[in-house]
Protein backbone atom coordinates (compact mmCIF):
# COMPACT_ATOMS: atom_id res chain seq x y z
CA UNK A 1 0.00 0.00 0.00
CA UNK A 2 1.29 3.46 -0.96
CA UNK A 3 1.70 5.97 1.86
CA UNK A 4 0.20 9.22 0.59
CA UNK A 5 1.22 12.66 1.80
CA UNK A 6 -1.69 14.46 3.39
CA UNK A 7 -2.88 17.58 1.60
CA UNK A 8 -0.33 17.43 -1.22
CA UNK A 9 -0.65 16.88 -4.95
CA UNK A 10 2.91 15.90 -5.85
CA UNK A 11 4.26 12.98 -3.87
CA UNK A 12 7.88 13.28 -5.01
CA UNK A 13 10.62 15.84 -5.64
CA UNK A 14 12.19 15.25 -9.08
CA UNK A 15 15.84 16.26 -9.36
CA UNK A 16 16.58 19.82 -10.42
CA UNK A 17 18.09 19.71 -13.91
CA UNK A 18 20.21 22.77 -13.09
CA UNK A 19 22.09 20.91 -10.34
CA UNK A 20 24.91 18.47 -11.10
CA UNK A 21 24.20 16.35 -8.03
CA UNK A 22 21.21 14.01 -7.96
CA UNK A 23 19.01 14.54 -4.94
CA UNK A 24 16.65 11.92 -3.49
CA UNK A 25 13.11 12.28 -4.84
CA UNK A 26 11.47 11.14 -1.61
CA UNK A 27 10.66 14.09 0.72
CA UNK A 28 11.55 14.54 4.37
CA UNK A 29 8.37 13.66 6.23
CA UNK A 30 6.96 15.00 9.47
CA UNK A 31 4.37 13.14 11.56
CA UNK A 32 0.94 14.65 11.18
CA UNK A 33 -2.63 14.04 12.24
CA UNK A 34 -3.48 10.34 12.66
CA UNK A 35 0.21 9.53 12.01
CA UNK A 36 -0.18 10.44 8.33
CA UNK A 37 3.01 12.00 6.91
CA UNK A 38 3.01 15.70 6.16
CA UNK A 39 5.27 18.25 4.54
CA UNK A 40 5.16 21.69 6.12
CA UNK A 41 4.94 24.86 4.00
CA UNK A 42 7.71 27.47 4.09
CA UNK A 43 7.10 31.07 3.01
CA UNK A 44 10.07 33.01 1.66
CA UNK A 45 9.51 36.77 1.57
CA UNK A 46 11.43 38.36 -1.28
CA UNK A 47 11.74 41.73 -3.00
CA UNK A 48 11.20 41.30 -6.71
CA UNK A 49 13.10 43.44 -9.22
CA UNK A 50 10.19 43.55 -11.67
CA UNK A 51 6.58 42.41 -11.42
CA UNK A 52 5.06 42.56 -14.92
CA UNK A 53 5.82 39.68 -17.27
CA UNK A 54 5.48 40.04 -21.04
CA UNK A 55 3.30 37.24 -22.44
CA UNK A 56 4.82 36.00 -25.69
CA UNK A 57 2.72 32.86 -26.17
CA UNK A 58 -0.06 33.10 -28.78
CA UNK A 59 -1.96 30.46 -26.77
CA UNK A 60 -2.37 32.77 -23.78
CA UNK A 61 -4.65 35.83 -23.98
CA UNK A 62 -3.34 39.23 -22.98
CA UNK A 63 0.00 40.99 -23.18
CA UNK A 64 1.17 41.00 -19.56
CA UNK A 65 0.80 38.91 -16.40
CA UNK A 66 1.50 39.57 -12.73
CA UNK A 67 2.34 36.84 -10.23
CA UNK A 68 2.49 37.91 -6.55
CA UNK A 69 3.69 34.43 -5.60
CA UNK A 70 6.21 31.97 -6.99
CA UNK A 71 5.14 28.42 -6.26
CA UNK A 72 1.58 27.52 -5.29
CA UNK A 73 0.27 25.82 -2.18
CA UNK A 74 -2.85 24.65 -4.00
CA UNK A 75 -0.72 21.74 -5.19
CA UNK A 76 -2.53 20.95 -8.46
CA UNK A 77 -0.61 17.91 -9.62
CA UNK A 78 -0.87 18.72 -13.35
CA UNK A 79 0.23 22.37 -13.09
CA UNK A 80 2.45 23.44 -16.00
CA UNK A 81 3.93 26.21 -13.83
CA UNK A 82 5.75 23.63 -11.71
CA UNK A 83 8.58 23.74 -14.25
CA UNK A 84 9.42 27.33 -13.26
CA UNK A 85 10.43 26.36 -9.72
CA UNK A 86 13.77 24.73 -10.66
CA UNK A 87 14.94 28.14 -11.92
CA UNK A 88 14.88 29.26 -8.28
CA UNK A 89 16.85 26.26 -7.05
CA UNK A 90 13.94 24.06 -6.03
CA UNK A 91 12.15 21.00 -7.34
CA UNK A 92 9.01 21.11 -9.49
CA UNK A 93 7.43 18.52 -7.19
CA UNK A 94 6.70 18.99 -3.50
CA UNK A 95 8.98 22.04 -3.36
CA UNK A 96 6.67 23.88 -5.76
CA UNK A 97 3.76 23.62 -3.34
CA UNK A 98 5.66 23.81 -0.04
CA UNK A 99 8.32 26.48 -0.69
CA UNK A 100 6.40 29.62 -1.64
CA UNK A 101 8.15 32.86 -2.56
CA UNK A 102 6.09 35.88 -1.54
CA UNK A 103 6.79 39.01 -3.59
CA UNK A 104 6.11 41.47 -0.82
CA UNK A 105 6.87 44.56 -2.92
CA UNK A 106 4.53 43.64 -5.78
CA UNK A 107 2.02 46.48 -5.16
CA UNK A 108 4.77 49.10 -5.12
CA UNK A 109 6.31 47.77 -8.33
CA UNK A 110 2.90 47.70 -10.01
CA UNK A 111 2.18 51.28 -8.96
CA UNK A 112 5.54 52.38 -10.35
CA UNK A 113 4.89 50.60 -13.67
CA UNK A 114 1.40 52.06 -14.09
CA UNK A 115 2.69 55.53 -13.19
CA UNK A 116 5.15 55.45 -16.07
CA UNK A 117 4.51 57.98 -18.85
CA UNK A 118 5.25 55.31 -21.45
CA UNK A 119 2.80 52.67 -20.16
CA UNK A 120 -0.16 51.97 -22.43
CA UNK A 121 -3.41 50.55 -21.05
CA UNK A 122 -3.90 46.83 -21.66
CA UNK A 123 -5.52 44.19 -19.42
CA UNK A 124 -2.99 42.64 -17.02
CA UNK A 125 -3.62 39.05 -15.95
CA UNK A 126 -3.30 38.00 -12.31
CA UNK A 127 -1.77 35.52 -12.13
CA UNK A 128 -1.25 33.37 -15.20
CA UNK A 129 1.35 31.20 -13.50
CA UNK A 130 0.40 30.59 -9.85
CA UNK A 131 -2.86 31.40 -8.08
CA UNK A 132 -2.97 34.92 -6.68
CA UNK A 133 -5.52 33.75 -4.06
CA UNK A 134 -3.62 30.80 -2.65
CA UNK A 135 -3.87 30.36 1.16
CA UNK A 136 -1.07 32.76 2.19
CA UNK A 137 -2.95 35.64 0.50
CA UNK A 138 -5.36 35.62 3.44
CA UNK A 139 -2.52 37.02 5.61
CA UNK A 140 -0.37 39.02 3.19
CA UNK A 141 -3.21 40.66 1.20
CA UNK A 142 -0.76 41.35 -1.64
CA UNK A 143 -3.37 40.64 -4.32
CA UNK A 144 -5.83 42.99 -2.64
CA UNK A 145 -3.19 45.72 -2.49
CA UNK A 146 -2.51 45.20 -6.20
CA UNK A 147 -6.24 45.53 -6.92
CA UNK A 148 -6.21 48.81 -5.02
CA UNK A 149 -3.43 49.98 -7.35
CA UNK A 150 -5.43 48.94 -10.42
CA UNK A 151 -8.42 50.88 -9.08
CA UNK A 152 -6.27 53.90 -8.26
CA UNK A 153 -5.11 54.05 -11.88
CA UNK A 154 -8.44 52.85 -13.34
CA UNK A 155 -6.49 50.15 -15.14
CA UNK A 156 -8.07 46.90 -16.45
CA UNK A 157 -7.18 43.59 -14.81
CA UNK A 158 -8.20 39.95 -15.26
CA UNK A 159 -7.95 37.40 -12.46
CA UNK A 160 -7.62 33.62 -12.58
CA UNK A 161 -8.29 31.58 -9.43
CA UNK A 162 -9.56 28.39 -7.82
CA UNK A 163 -10.12 29.95 -4.43
CA UNK A 164 -13.29 31.53 -3.06
CA UNK A 165 -11.04 33.86 -1.04
CA UNK A 166 -11.48 36.29 -3.94
CA UNK A 167 -14.88 37.22 -2.45
CA UNK A 168 -13.01 39.06 0.30
CA UNK A 169 -12.19 41.68 -2.35
CA UNK A 170 -15.70 41.98 -3.71
CA UNK A 171 -15.85 45.68 -2.85
CA UNK A 172 -12.95 46.54 -5.17
CA UNK A 173 -14.08 44.09 -7.85
CA UNK A 174 -17.53 45.69 -7.98
CA UNK A 175 -16.02 49.14 -8.47
CA UNK A 176 -13.79 47.84 -11.24
CA UNK A 177 -16.71 46.02 -12.88
CA UNK A 178 -18.91 49.12 -12.97
CA UNK A 179 -16.25 50.77 -15.13
CA UNK A 180 -15.54 47.69 -17.30
CA UNK A 181 -12.11 47.19 -15.79
CA UNK A 182 -12.22 43.57 -14.61
CA UNK A 183 -13.13 39.98 -15.39
CA UNK A 184 -12.62 36.79 -13.40
CA UNK A 185 -11.79 33.32 -14.69
CA UNK A 186 -12.68 30.57 -12.22
CA UNK A 187 -11.03 27.22 -12.86
CA UNK A 188 -13.42 24.23 -12.55
CA UNK A 189 -12.73 21.02 -14.45
CA UNK A 190 -14.96 18.45 -12.72
CA UNK A 191 -18.07 18.00 -10.60
CA UNK A 192 -16.41 15.20 -8.63
CA UNK A 193 -15.07 16.71 -5.40
CA UNK A 194 -13.35 13.46 -4.41
CA UNK A 195 -11.27 13.71 -7.57
CA UNK A 196 -10.71 17.42 -6.85
CA UNK A 197 -9.35 16.64 -3.39
CA UNK A 198 -6.72 14.36 -4.90
CA UNK A 199 -5.99 16.40 -8.02
CA UNK A 200 -6.09 19.90 -6.49
CA UNK A 201 -5.75 19.24 -2.75
CA UNK A 202 -5.69 22.76 -1.26
CA UNK A 203 -8.16 24.48 -3.54
CA UNK A 204 -11.75 25.46 -2.71
CA UNK A 205 -14.31 22.68 -3.09
CA UNK A 206 -16.30 22.38 -6.32
CA UNK A 207 -19.50 23.55 -4.59
CA UNK A 208 -17.72 26.62 -3.21
CA UNK A 209 -16.37 27.47 -6.65
CA UNK A 210 -19.79 27.15 -8.27
CA UNK A 211 -21.17 29.42 -5.56
CA UNK A 212 -18.28 31.77 -6.31
CA UNK A 213 -19.32 31.95 -9.96
CA UNK A 214 -22.90 32.69 -8.89
CA UNK A 215 -21.94 35.44 -6.42
CA UNK A 216 -19.58 37.19 -8.83
CA UNK A 217 -22.15 37.10 -11.62
CA UNK A 218 -24.87 38.43 -9.32
CA UNK A 219 -22.68 41.46 -8.59
CA UNK A 220 -22.16 42.20 -12.27
CA UNK A 221 -18.62 40.89 -12.51
CA UNK A 222 -18.00 39.06 -15.83
CA UNK A 223 -17.12 35.42 -15.09
CA UNK A 224 -15.57 32.89 -17.45
CA UNK A 225 -14.96 29.32 -16.32
CA UNK A 226 -11.79 27.54 -17.35
CA UNK A 227 -12.46 23.81 -17.62
CA UNK A 228 -8.78 23.04 -17.47
CA UNK A 229 -7.26 20.71 -17.83
CA UNK A 230 -9.48 17.98 -19.21
CA UNK A 231 -7.75 14.67 -18.51
CA UNK A 232 -9.26 11.80 -20.54
CA UNK A 233 -10.05 8.86 -18.31
CA UNK A 234 -10.37 11.06 -15.20
CA UNK A 235 -12.67 14.06 -15.74
CA UNK A 236 -13.94 13.91 -19.33
CA UNK A 237 -17.15 12.02 -18.54
CA UNK A 238 -19.29 14.84 -17.10
CA UNK A 239 -18.68 17.70 -19.54
CA UNK A 240 -22.34 18.40 -20.38
CA UNK A 241 -23.63 18.41 -16.75
CA UNK A 242 -20.63 20.52 -15.73
CA UNK A 243 -21.34 23.21 -18.34
CA UNK A 244 -25.08 23.11 -17.53
CA UNK A 245 -24.42 23.77 -13.84
CA UNK A 246 -21.98 26.57 -14.63
CA UNK A 247 -24.46 28.20 -17.01
CA UNK A 248 -27.12 28.09 -14.31
CA UNK A 249 -24.67 29.75 -11.91
CA UNK A 250 -24.20 32.67 -14.30
CA UNK A 251 -20.92 32.01 -16.11
CA UNK A 252 -20.69 33.85 -19.42
CA UNK A 253 -19.02 30.91 -21.10
CA UNK A 254 -16.65 27.99 -20.55
CA UNK A 255 -13.23 27.58 -22.12
CA UNK A 256 -11.60 24.16 -22.14
CA UNK A 257 -7.96 23.05 -22.34
CA UNK A 258 -6.62 19.51 -22.50
CA UNK A 259 -3.88 18.27 -20.22
CA UNK A 260 -0.24 18.47 -21.26
CA UNK A 261 2.44 16.94 -19.08
CA UNK A 262 5.39 19.18 -19.85
CA UNK A 263 8.85 18.81 -18.32
CA UNK A 264 8.96 17.41 -14.78
CA UNK A 265 5.14 17.37 -14.63
CA UNK A 266 5.16 14.10 -16.58
CA UNK A 267 7.10 12.32 -13.81
CA UNK A 268 5.09 13.99 -11.05
CA UNK A 269 1.71 13.20 -12.62
CA UNK A 270 2.65 9.62 -13.52
CA UNK A 271 3.75 8.95 -9.94
CA UNK A 272 0.55 10.53 -8.59
CA UNK A 273 -1.63 8.55 -11.00
CA UNK A 274 -0.03 5.24 -10.06
CA UNK A 275 -0.59 5.92 -6.36
CA UNK A 276 -4.15 7.24 -6.65
CA UNK A 277 -5.59 5.32 -9.61
CA UNK A 278 -3.37 2.28 -10.25
CA UNK A 279 -6.21 0.45 -11.98
CA UNK A 280 -6.36 3.00 -14.80
CA UNK A 281 -2.81 4.34 -14.91
CA UNK A 282 -1.89 2.92 -18.32
CA UNK A 283 -5.27 3.77 -19.81
CA UNK A 284 -5.10 7.43 -18.77
CA UNK A 285 -1.48 7.86 -19.88
CA UNK A 286 -2.21 6.29 -23.27
CA UNK A 287 -5.16 8.65 -23.74
CA UNK A 288 -3.00 11.64 -22.82
CA UNK A 289 -0.44 10.48 -25.38
CA UNK A 290 -3.19 10.30 -28.00
CA UNK A 291 -3.75 14.03 -27.50
CA UNK A 292 -0.14 14.84 -28.36
CA UNK A 293 0.78 12.48 -31.23
CA UNK A 294 2.09 9.71 -29.03
CA UNK A 295 3.79 11.88 -26.41
CA UNK A 296 2.74 13.17 -22.99
CA UNK A 297 3.30 16.76 -24.07
CA UNK A 298 3.30 18.97 -27.12
CA UNK A 299 5.19 22.25 -27.25
CA UNK A 300 3.75 23.45 -30.56
CA UNK A 301 1.83 26.73 -30.33
CA UNK A 302 -1.81 26.38 -31.29
CA UNK A 303 -1.82 22.66 -30.49
CA UNK A 304 -0.26 22.12 -27.08
CA UNK A 305 -3.34 23.23 -25.11
CA UNK A 306 -5.97 21.96 -27.55
CA UNK A 307 -4.44 18.63 -28.48
CA UNK A 308 -5.16 16.72 -31.65
CA UNK A 309 -6.63 13.39 -32.71
CA UNK A 310 -9.92 11.61 -32.10
CA UNK A 311 -10.14 11.98 -28.30
CA UNK A 312 -9.29 15.68 -28.46
CA UNK A 313 -11.96 16.17 -31.14
CA UNK A 314 -14.57 14.39 -29.01
CA UNK A 315 -13.74 16.57 -25.99
CA UNK A 316 -14.04 19.81 -27.97
CA UNK A 317 -17.25 18.66 -29.70
CA UNK A 318 -18.85 17.98 -26.31
CA UNK A 319 -18.01 21.49 -25.12
CA UNK A 320 -19.30 23.03 -28.36
CA UNK A 321 -22.57 21.12 -27.95
CA UNK A 322 -22.83 22.12 -24.27
CA UNK A 323 -22.38 25.81 -25.11
CA UNK A 324 -25.11 25.58 -27.78
CA UNK A 325 -27.48 23.75 -25.44
CA UNK A 326 -27.10 26.04 -22.47
CA UNK A 327 -26.94 29.40 -24.29
CA UNK A 328 -23.64 30.59 -22.87
CA UNK A 329 -22.75 34.19 -23.73
CA UNK A 330 -19.75 33.72 -26.02
CA UNK A 331 -19.15 37.39 -26.79
CA UNK A 332 -15.71 38.78 -25.88
CA UNK A 333 -15.45 40.77 -22.66
CA UNK A 334 -14.80 44.44 -23.36
CA UNK A 335 -12.59 46.61 -21.17
CA UNK A 336 -12.47 50.39 -20.93
CA UNK A 337 -8.90 51.31 -21.87
CA UNK A 338 -9.54 55.06 -21.92
CA UNK A 339 -10.11 55.61 -18.20
CA UNK A 340 -6.47 54.89 -17.45
CA UNK A 341 -5.29 57.55 -19.88
CA UNK A 342 -7.76 60.04 -18.41
CA UNK A 343 -6.54 59.31 -14.87
CA UNK A 344 -2.92 59.59 -15.95
CA UNK A 345 -3.51 63.02 -17.46
CA UNK A 346 -5.38 64.10 -14.35
CA UNK A 347 -2.54 62.98 -12.09
CA UNK A 348 0.12 64.65 -14.24
CA UNK A 349 -1.80 67.92 -14.18
CA UNK A 350 -1.22 68.14 -10.43
CA UNK A 351 2.53 68.76 -10.92
Image (tube, rainbow, N blue to C red):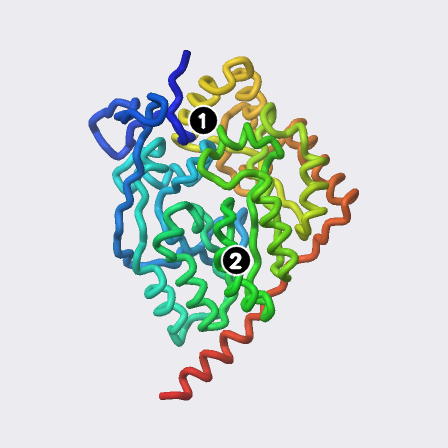
Disc 2 crowd rating (10 Å Cα; few below 14, some 14-19, many 20+) is some
What percent of the width, then of the height, locates residue 171?
52, 64
Q: Residue furthest right?
A: 325
**Quadrant placement of the N terminus:** top left
**Quadrant placement of the C terminus:** bottom left
Describe residue 192's horizontal placement relative to residue 151 as left or right: right
Q: Compared with residue 102, is residue 31 higher up or lower down, i.e. above or below?
A: above
Q: Secondary structure at mark 2?
A: strand
For the residues labelled 1 and 2, the Cα–Cα distance comes to: 29 Å
What percent of the width, then of the height, locates residue 244?
72, 41
Q: Nearer the viewer, residue 165 or 156?
A: 165
Describe residue 247's horizontal placement relative to residue 85 as left or right: right
Q: Nearer the viewer, residue 159 or 256?
A: 159
Occupied quadrant, residue 308: top right
What percent of the width, then of the height, locates residue 48?
29, 56
- The residue under the point 45% across, 18% down is 275
- How many discs mark residues in the rendered view? 2
- The residue under the point 56% across, 20% down is 286
> Which residue does the numbered mark 1 point to in the structure image?
269
What percent of the width, then of the height, locates residue 254?
65, 45
- The residue under the point 54% across, 67% down is 176
Q: Let me know if residue 293 appears in the view.
A: yes
> Which residue does the numbered mark 2 point to in the structure image?
158
Residue 151: image tag:
none
Amino acid sequence: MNLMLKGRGAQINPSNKFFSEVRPSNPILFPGENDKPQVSTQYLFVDAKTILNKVDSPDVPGDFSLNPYQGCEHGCVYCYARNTHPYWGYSAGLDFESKIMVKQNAPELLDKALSSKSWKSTPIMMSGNTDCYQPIERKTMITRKCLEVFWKHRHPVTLVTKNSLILRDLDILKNLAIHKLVSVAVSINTLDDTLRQRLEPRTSSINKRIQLVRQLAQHGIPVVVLAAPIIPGLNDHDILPLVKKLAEAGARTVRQLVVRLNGDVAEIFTDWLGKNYPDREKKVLNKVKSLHKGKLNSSAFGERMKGSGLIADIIHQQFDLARRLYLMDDTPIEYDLDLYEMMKQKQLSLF
